[in-house]
Image (cartoon, rainbow, N blue to C red):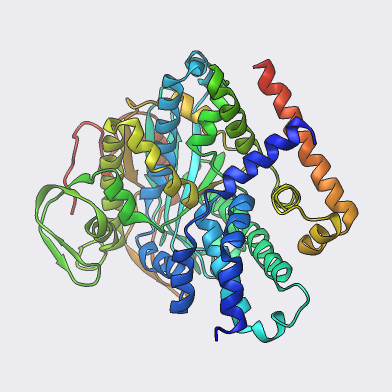
Amino acid sequence: MTNDEMLIREAIGEEAGQAVDPGTVLAALHGGRKPRRSRGLAVAIAGVAVTAGIAGVMIPLTASRGDEAGPAAANAATGAQGEQTILVLGLDKLVDEGQRPDSIMLLRAGADGSFRALSVPRDSRIDPESKLNMAYLKAGGGDKGAQATAAEVEKLTGVRAQHYVTVAMTDFPELSTAVGGVEVCLKKAVNDQLSGANLPAGKQTVSGEQALAFLRQRRGLPNGDLDRIARHQAFLRGLAARLATLEPAKLTALVDTVKRTVHTDAALDVLGLARRLTSQSGLTAATIPTDGSVDTPSAGQALAVDPVKVRKFTTEFFGNGPAPAGGGAPNGTDTRTPCVN
Amino acid sequence: MPDGFDQFVTDRLDRLLRYATAMTCDRYLAQDIVQEALLRAQRRWGRIGAMDAPYLYVQRMVTNEYLSWWRRRASRDVASPATTIAALTPPVGDPAVHHAERDAMRARIAQLPRKQRAALVLRYYEDRSDAEIAEVLKCTAGTVRSHISRALKTLRADNRVMEVL
């Protein structure tokens, strides 16, 4: 046996040693249930830009810190490239059939390390019969679904995403707890039984189940899904701020969660992205302008969108100025914790 | 007296989880697919349990679950920061060298195409013959040899690149 083969054996053995405790699987088998997946279903309603944020913010942050700490720091400067636009899809379920993106975002990583997120509501009407989030499933999901969604988003916004990232929400409460909570601010106190959101008005740090409820609540908010998107963005900004101040050891502890929830197209150079994003990267978020609810013949209520307005807004937003007026829920970078619905 | 399935799980669960973890490079995904495969095997245990090699059959279910899971998903995992750091950091310092080399190898294995990785794990972790691997992967022994030789070639080529860096 060659040295290479011995090294391979050891490496595979090391990987195998990461297996979970059989006891957890035994418990699931005896319960006759699939707890991880079903929890995924329940949790995933939160859909969410949040893991999107994790994909976009946390991995680069973690990697860039590893970079600074390691001897390869000298290479850091060589990663500078042009800007990159990534389509981020927050999927509502795990692998099982019927998967749809609940949260759809264009994420632009600027060459200067800035970071802009534009939400495109899942209910945006893309033709008289369909909403944006139907494109994914129609194309068969997976890579094809992501590409089909990217094509529809391009039609709507005029921006072509070079890459995509899909995320399925599975372990959200643990994640928010692991970072030590995320600071958000509510304009009004809420108590919604459906999502379990029971939160006071004003600035607060949410984690665990309450963070999840904060992200899930759609009922009882004047603008439904649009208000929920505003919460996703607020949370994302709070998360980015939190991650920027978190010690590296804690970040590393989150790696497992990120790794199992985030998937990308093969060409996305996460490392390259990592080299240009730093903890100083700001995050600005906004939602495309929409024109109210309309009925569709077979897809229920959709949000009317005017491609001309949307394109204009998108161009201005990605033009690196402040978030333009007219869109939903602009969240500028200036206020640290803007209050939402 | 425990039924055949319970006995099978008691005997084999740990090994199956390790196998799946090595193949997927993702302990939680491994947990999901092993759980899924065992739940399905349980429903058909009358037939599976009567086979000559139930373990091989269940291992094939686990492998298929992974390969088809992949077909339904985006094409690869984001390089984890662990992988990233391993790739960024050339091994330095005497006692750390071997450990770093092994971690770097782990990172490179994680980047292999899934069938090549499955074949590699069956060969170097499960010590299976070409014919057995062919049965698990539902291909010919020739294809198995080709998967493994390609994987080895990639891992060696990467090695050279690492050394130059």
Q: Residue at 19%, 72% (x, y): give it.
A: A193
Residue A334, placed above or below residue B119: above
A115 with respect to A182 (left or right): right
**Residue A309 in sight:** no
**x and y percent of residue A1 in the render?**
80, 36
Identity of the residue furthest to the front in this view: B1
Q: Residue at 32%, 43% (x, y): give it.
A: A286
Q: Quadrant of residue B162?
A: top right
Residue A140, placed above or below residue A256: below
Q: Residue at 36%, 63% (x, y): give it.
A: A43
Q: Residue at 60%, 31% (x, y): give it.
A: B104
Viewer-proximal residue, B84 or A14? Answer: A14
Residue A280, placed above or below residue A338: above
Identity of the residue furthest to the top in this view: A74
**x and y percent of residue A155 in the render?**
53, 49
**x and y percent of residue B19 in the render?**
63, 56
A165 with respect to A47 (left or right): right
Q: Quadrant of residue B163?
A: top right
**Residue B37 in sight:** yes
